[in-house]
Image: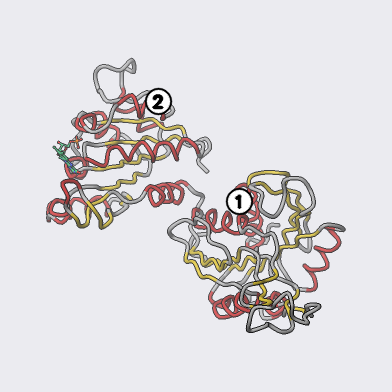
Amino acid sequence: MFSGKRIVLGVSGGIAAYKAVEICRHLVANGAHVTPIMTTGSKKFLGELTLSALASERVKSSLWEDDDPIPHTTLGQQADLILIAPATAKLIGTYAAGISNDLLTATLLASRAPVIICPAMHTEMWEHPAVQDNIRTLKNRGVFVVDPEDGQLAGGDEGKGRLAATDLIVSKVERVLGPNDLENLKILITAGGTREEIDPVRFISNRSSGKQGYAIAAAAVARGATVTLITTVEREAPPDVEIQCAESARDLQAAVMSCAKNHDIIIMAAAVADFHPSKIAHTKLKKTSSFKKIDLEPTHDFLVDLGEDKLPHQTIVGFAAETENLEKNALEKLFKKKLDLIVANDVSAPETGFAYDTNAVLLLSAETKQSIPLADKRVVAERILDAIVKIRQNDY
Ligand SMILES: Cc1cc2nc3c(=O)[nH]c(=O)nc-3n(C[C@H](O)[C@H](O)[C@H](O)COP(=O)(O)O)c2cc1C
């Protein structure tokens, strides 16, 4: 996610300073080079060694004692992003006033990189007009603010002021660092395998885990899209994704068709059942019953409807999970369903398709064939979105 990006992580002196460790871990795990700067106050709350051990380099704090002769400008100039978590009332005030009185505030002022601040403080402090004025000033200057949450505060108090959750902060970092090439676009994504009821306790399903659909949703949000995810499975998704649940092919169809027209891009990553039982038993089928076989009938292929009714501004992407004749079968689907792009994967190949964290796919449009070799599903998601962006620019 953050490969090759240099992030300065500023930590100021509040109770939530210990949470900076978790944030740092996430950023580093996702490829960022994290340079930590701690204020003198933050060291009362968090051991410098802990952050040094988890970041990409040792903690920096001083304007005067570093090997670098001009530390106050170097870090800010090199940064792709400055993230302050937690940001105290003092830090926010000092930054808003343009005062440079330690390494962190000097770095903030000597930088043109985007800045995200994540305030954390007691409710009274957060609501104080001076703090709110400073927050407004910073927002007006283009600083991104991840607002604190309601919840338990230090000293047994409760209210607004808790540092925002780590995933919310990391997701904001993704959005700010991302290419933003999907900004102002609404994307509808489906994920997971449908469950077709046999009786109240049994169903027919498939091995789809939903991981690829969720990875596309996360990548799309990071690139600025507004994302609705209709899913049959519960997985962790970025906080900005709107989640709707569905179970059967019929549910999924109803959910998709009810909002399809409001979306610019529709990505049907869900493994929708091709068949469902003709009849659903209303009570549990007994071993002893005369029941011998389940009659199946085809589900309605609503991807065909989406292709037929496609609006001029829409891009429709289908998935083809195949075990043989991958390219031929996928191309047939592409043309039959009037899709703009089909993502074909051979689900019988090693480490690809259902349930794995990795995938290898063939992206096929009417004019182009692109092979995406085995990679993490997030990487595959980015390549699918790259292809969609190019299709929309008539460049694929
Ligand atoms: C126990 C304790 C907890 C504190 N928690 C916070 C806090 O959560 N948010 C805040 O803005 N200030 C908090 N403060 C006040 C700051 O530590 C103080 O303003 C300090 O000067 C901040 O310096 P710095 O921003 O340079 O790190 C706390 C102080 C103490 C003693």
Ligand 1 resides in the quarter of the picture at: top left
Give the residue drawn at x 32%, y 28%: 73
Callout 1: helix, strand or loop? helix
Give the residue drawn at x 63%, y 82%: 283
Residue 36 coordinates in the image, percent (x, y): 35, 31
| Mark 2: amino acid | Ala
Q: Which mark is residue 260?
A: none
Callout 2: helix, strand or loop? helix
Q: Residue furthest front?
A: 288
Q: Nearer the viewer, residue 204 or 323?
A: 204
Q: State the image quarter where residue 64 is shown.
A: top left
Q: How is the image coloured?
A: secondary structure
Residue 263 coordinates in the image, percent (x, y): 55, 72
For the C terminus, the image quarter is bottom right
The number of numbered discs placed on residues in the rendered structure image is: 2
Residue 327 coordinates in the image, percent (x, y): 83, 58
Q: Is residue 120 left or right of residue 4?
A: left
Crowding at dot 2, Cα within 10 Å, few <14 / some 14-19 / many 20+, comes out as: few
* Dots 2, 1 in contact, CB < 8 A: no
**Circle 2 residue:** 53
| Mark 1: amino acid | Glu
Q: Is residue 158 left or right of residue 356?
A: left
**Circle 1 residue:** 382
Crowding at dot 1, Cα within 10 Å, few <14 / some 14-19 / many 20+, comes out as: some
Question: How far apart in space, not on screen, are marks 2 and 1 (Cα)?
Answer: 31 Å
Residue 390 coordinates in the image, percent (x, y): 65, 57
